[in-house]
Image: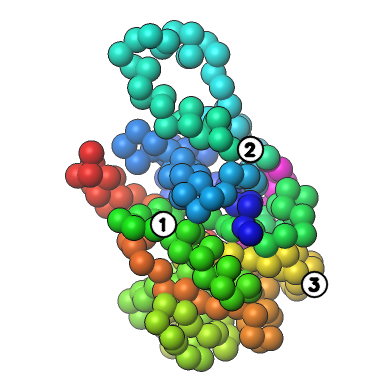
Amino acid sequence: MIKKCLFPAAGYGTRFLPATKSLPKEMLPIITKPLIHYGVEEAMEAGIHNMAIVTGRGKRALEDYFDISYELEHQIKGSSKEPLLKEIRHIQNSCVFTYIRQKEMRGLGDAILKGEPLIGQEPFAVILADDLCVNENDGVIKQMVKAYNRYKCSIVAVMEVPQNETHKYGIIKPLEQNDSIIKIADMVEKPSNEEAPSNLAIIGRYILTPDIFDILRSIKAGVNGELQITDALKLQAKEGKVLGYKFEGIRFDCGSIEGFVKATNYMYKKL
Ligand code: G1P
């Protein structure tokens, strides 16, 4: 059973400066809900109620968001605005949140490793909140939890990207594909167009088995001098212990301004 979801949320979000100077990028709202709220809802839909958040300096707004604001509750009680708090109250009432700080920005692999005390020795989900995923049916993490229950190994969500965008992603080298499940031979972080083994990119949804922590401890920094989760998964993949999952749904890259605006327009039309 996947019971915990890790949210690496320590990054600076420099593409959204100056807004992110004092606001965590995960708190940027798509209409009225911050990005991380969508991620938490996606995890809850998959039956996960334990949210482990790796934060950093200047990220306290995240903790406050998932806590009760007595003053606000007092002000709003009985007013016409009270229904606006319904969804966040539901999250507060049904989930447990734990936090740990990543002191230095040493990459996604390091952020995940920093989350180890919150996860322990069990398989867990990872959601990168700035990849916003939507689907009419099961959400992406729910789809992946179902796949995990069947295959019991690490799973990465993948989608096809234009060949000239491979340098933005971890890219897999597929071995064979059976419907949405892809056996992975190898993977590489942010390869150039020429070096990319395919155009199948890993997006910000993972199911990881806990041996990933020891692997992360054993590897060296990779691309950009950062500890890369892709490099750790590559070692698991060599042993046939990672699957790619071609998810159903739409993914918005809300780490980019263009993707953020697209997601906003999409959600606005759904109101
Ligand atoms: C990270 C991962 C990369 C993955 C991407 C998905 O990169 O390192 O493998 O493809 O997330 O969004 P980042 O976007 O943090 O540079």
Q: Secondary structure at mark 1?
A: loop
Rounded to the nearest angstrom, the CA distance separating label 2 from label 3 is: 31 Å
Q: Residue 264, relative to residue 231: is it above or below?
A: above
| Mark-to-mark CA distance, 3 and 1 | 33 Å
Query: Residue 221's spot in the image, x, y percent?
Result: 70, 70
Q: Is residue 230 left or right of residue 258?
A: right
Q: Is mark 2 within 8 Å of ligand 1?
A: no
> Which residue carries the number 1 mark?
139
Residue appearing at x 25%, y 49% in the figure: 266
Mark sitting earlier along the chain (2/3): 2
Quarter holding the C terminus? top left
Determine which of the numbered discs, if any, sits on residue 95 in the image.
none
Q: Residues within 10 Å of mark 3 (few under 14, many from 20)?
A: few
Residue named by callout 3: 218
In the rendered image, the residue lying farthest to the bottom is 175
For the residues carrying marks 3 and 1, which lies nearer the camera in this image? 1
Rendered location of residue 207, percent (x, y) = 59, 64
Between circles 2 and 3, the one closer to the viewer is 2
Which amino acid type is marked by label 2?
Answer: Val
Q: Which residues are magenta?
A: 99-109
Q: Is residue 221 left or right of residue 181?
A: right
Asked if the magenta segment contains residue 77, the reply would be no
Q: Secondary structure at mark 2?
A: strand
Let me know if residue 106 is in the magenta part.
yes
Measured from the top left, where is residue 253 in percent x and y? 38, 57
* Front residue of 129 and 167: 129
- Residue 258, quarter of picture: bottom left
